[in-house]
């Protein structure tokens, strides 16, 4: 029995010791290497903020005045970290105000839930005129986000790793389950938007 209690105590002490251990966070060069493999825009680390459980690495684009963060999150038990690259979140935030300025003039735009990360922009139509207005608006939104392609010419703006601004188009009186989804790609003009929406209708 004493041997059993001693073993339990030894395991408890070991567990406490391991949880007290904290490996140093990833080096800047390591995080820069991770970013280079994921982010389509050339960037470098300009600062590091260590808050123990989370370590924040601020990156600045080499091509423009734009920053984003990489968060290194300590694994359970304090052994090592996993990195969360927040490039797409920063990209969406960077272009969001310009999109809203355009959306203000579209009577078919209804809402977007800002409390949900990367929620869809919701449109509603009841006539062919409404559909035409939505298509025209989406083409203008594509023009706005096409700016990103100056810095990331080969990037797929529909990817969740890059931008992924989703439009949800609902017919009045119908279930949202029947909504048409369109994702801004920075390329489509009105004709191309109409074709994709028609294919998904």
Image: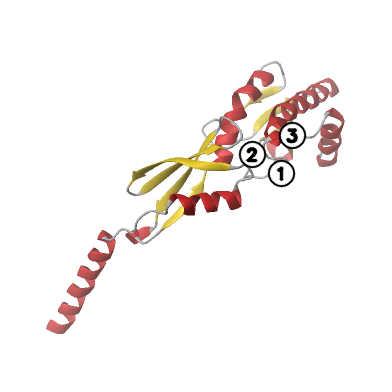
Q: Position of residue 81 (x, y in %)?
A: 42, 56
Whether residue 174 sits left or right of residue 98 in the image: it is right
Q: Observer-nearest residue: 14 or 69?
A: 69
Residue that numbered label 2 is attached to: 163
Above or below, 7 against 130 in this view is: below
Q: Which mark is residue 156?
A: 1
Instruction: Say what secondary structure mark 2 lies in.
Output: loop
Q: How far apart, in angstroms, are the residues tagged by discs 2 and 3?
A: 10 Å
Above or below, 67 against 24 in this view is: above
- The quarter of the rendered structure image containing the N terminus is bottom left
Q: Quadrant of residue 200?
A: top right
Which circle's residue, 3 or 1, is located before the other in the chain?
1
Q: Which mark is residue 186?
A: 3
Q: How far apart, in angstroms, are the residues tagged by discs 3 and 1?
A: 9 Å
Q: Observer-nearest residue: 58 or 132?
A: 58
How crowded pointer 2 is (Cα within 10 Å; few <14, some 14-19, many 20+) is rated as many
């Amino acid at each position: 029995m004493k041997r059993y209690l001693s073993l339990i105590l030894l395991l408890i002490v070991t567990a406490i010791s391991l949880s007290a251990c904290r490996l140093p966070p990833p080096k800047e060069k390591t995080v820069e290497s991770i970013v280079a493999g994921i982010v389509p825009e050339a960037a470098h680390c300009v600062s590091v903020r260590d808050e123990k459980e989370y370590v924040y690495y601020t990156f600045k684009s080499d091509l423009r005045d734009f920053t984003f963060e990489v968060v290194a999150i300590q694994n359970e038990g304090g052994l090592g970290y996993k990195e969360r690259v927040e490039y797409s979140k920063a990209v969406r935030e960077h272009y969001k105000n310009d999109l809203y300025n355009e959306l203000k003039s579209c009577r078919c735009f209804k809402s977007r839930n800002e409390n949900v990360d990367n929620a869809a922009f919701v449109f509603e139509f009841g006539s062919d005129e409404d559909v035409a207005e939505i298509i025209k608006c989406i083409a203008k939104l594509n023009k706005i986000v096409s700016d990103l392609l100056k810095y990331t010419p080969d990037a797929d703006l529909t990817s969740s790793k890059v931008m992924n601004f989703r439009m949800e188009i609902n017919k009045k009186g119908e279930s949202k389950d029947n909504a048409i989804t369109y994702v801004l790609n920075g390329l489509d003009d009105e004709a191309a938007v109409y074709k994709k929406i028609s294919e998904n209708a």
